[in-house]
Amino acid sequence: MNRTRIATGLVISGGWLALLLYGPFWLFWLTFLVLGALALNEYFAMTLASSSRRDKVFGTLLGLLPLLAAYVGKPEAVSAGLFLSLFFLIVYSLTRYSVLDKSHAEFSAFALMMRLGFGVFYVGFSFSHFTLMLTLTEGKHLLILLTVITVFSDSFAYYTGMLLGRHKMAPAISPGKTIEGLIGGMTGSIIGAIIVCIWFFPSYSLVKMSLLTVFISLIGVMGDLTESMIKRTVGVKDSGHILPGHGGVLDRLDSLMIAAPVLFYLLDFGIVSL
């Protein structure tokens, strides 16, 4: 399993770097449109397992609207796409009310609306920020930084937790994660971020980069725990099986998809300037 996981990780990393360094904007957008569709399908397959296929397909289509709007390259376009998604979600939920509530289905129309709505926001809206990141100055390098922070954090946390882990961090959500692993992950992410900073952002303070990295690393952990909570609630181990050794798209990008919007808005609003 470890060899499979490493081999898959190397292929993903190589493809990701090639896309960032050499791929045109439209190809990057299209790639995340496809990845977003896969992630949305995984999310609704988990959370709406007993619902009709129509609900899952409609949820996936709704979630793609912010991703489609990201092609414009403006946050307001993504916000408009999100609003359209929520508007059509309300209309759809109203049409499903009489069927679901009168038939005493497992999900009421309101519960269906909440699960669909969270999927649109959690996956569709979050994924759109990968494309928005590319529109920023040094966007490609920022995405490399974000990726290195997340990958180093995950890797160091895994091995540190395996070797030294004693104190559980969130046993009810993810029993395998430890405080020691968290510390190791933050240490690894700082090392990775400093390397990227020296290479791509040589004028930026290493102290500031370290502080930003700790914050982004913690956001990534929160994203990881969010998906773990969803999987534990619905009783599945992985969101999918498309990536050998890694599970599904959500399993691989759960940390990045929350960290990307956070870093984007820190930069877009001038709170952080690299």
Image: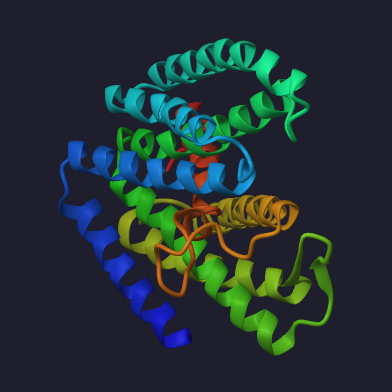
Using the image as rendered, state which of residue 34 and residue 161 is in the foreground: 34
Picture quadrant of residue 112: top right
Q: Position of residue 200 (x, y in %)?
A: 32, 56
Farthest residue to the front: give it.
Answer: 103
Q: Vertically, is 241 above or below 244?
A: above
Q: Vertically, is 136 above or below 167?
A: above
Using the image as rendered, state which of residue 143 and residue 131 is in the foreground: 131
Judged left or right of residue 16, residue 210 is right
Using the image as rendered, state which of residue 263 and residue 9 is in the foreground: 9
- Is residue 51 visible in the rendered image? The answer is yes
Judged left or right of residue 145, residue 230 is right
- Is residue 193 visible in the rendered image? The answer is no
- Name which residue lies at 32% across and 38% down: 33
Q: Position of residue 172 (x, y in %)?
A: 83, 62
Quarter of the image that includes the C terminus: top left
Picture quadrant of residue 170: bottom right
